[in-house]
Amino acid sequence: MTHLSRVTPAFFTEQLNQEAAAFFTLVHTALPALRASSGSVVAVTTAATDRFPVRDGLSAGTKGAVEQLVRGFAAEEGRYGVRFNAVGPGMLTDGMAERLISSAELDQGALDVTMSRIPLKRFGSAADIAEAVCFLASDAAGFISGQKLNVDGGYTV
């Protein structure tokens, strides 16, 4: 995690390629199968595209590009019955946050500030994200396309 002013253009480009270009390439390759099956794609992005996190602008920027691709593909591929959605995780107790906490890159002060901005007063888990992804991929969400569901305890309210 770092301020955008400390990110080099080369590193930004690398991250953009790893996030947005990789997503585009994967979807482009899978389009024939998605069309044939009226499939569904759920991208996992970040809640940070809706409430900017200081020191995490790089992630928000590249995942914002993925979210726009989700919306674009939803608009274009809906005629084939293909749905595209995204899930925007907030602060979690596992995954990247766990690594940042254990490395002391996120100290208790930063965690307290973040927690104070979450109405549910707790961090989420990977299981919370998985439930949202499963819902959006399921037939229960059959009339939902081009949307992002933030799973963030209310952080983006």
Image (tube, rainbow, N blue to C red):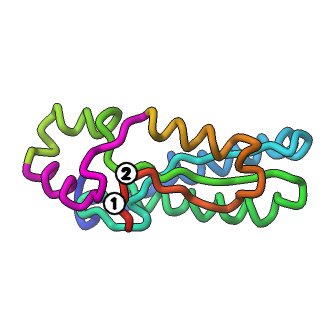
Contact between labelled residues 1 and 2, with CB atoms less than 8 Å apart: yes
What amino acid is labelled 2 in the image? Answer: Gly
Q: Residues within 10 Å of mark 1 (few under 14, many from 20)?
A: many
Compared with 13, 107 (above or below) is above
Compared with 87, 29 (above or below) is above
Name the residue located 35 percent from the left edge and 42 percent from the top edge: 124
Q: Which residues are magenta?
A: 109-126
Quarter of the image for residue 78 reads bottom right
Element type at mark 1: loop
Compared with 92, 56 (above or below) is below
Measured as percent of width and height from the top left, residue 65 is found at 54, 62
- Say which quadrant the C terminus sits in: bottom left
Residue 53 shows which numbered tag? none
Quarter of the image for residue 54 reads bottom left
Residue holding disc 2: 90
Measured as percent of width and height from the top left, residue 154 is found at 37, 59
Residue holding disc 1: 155
What amino acid is labelled 1 in the image? Answer: Tyr
Task: State left or right for residue 72 relative to residue 10.
Answer: right
Name the residue located 46 percent from the left edge and 58 percent from the top edge: 62
Measured as percent of width and height from the top left, residue 123 is found at 29, 44
Q: CA distance from mark 2 to mark 1?
A: 7 Å
Name the residue located 12 percent from the left edge and 38 percent from the top edge: 104
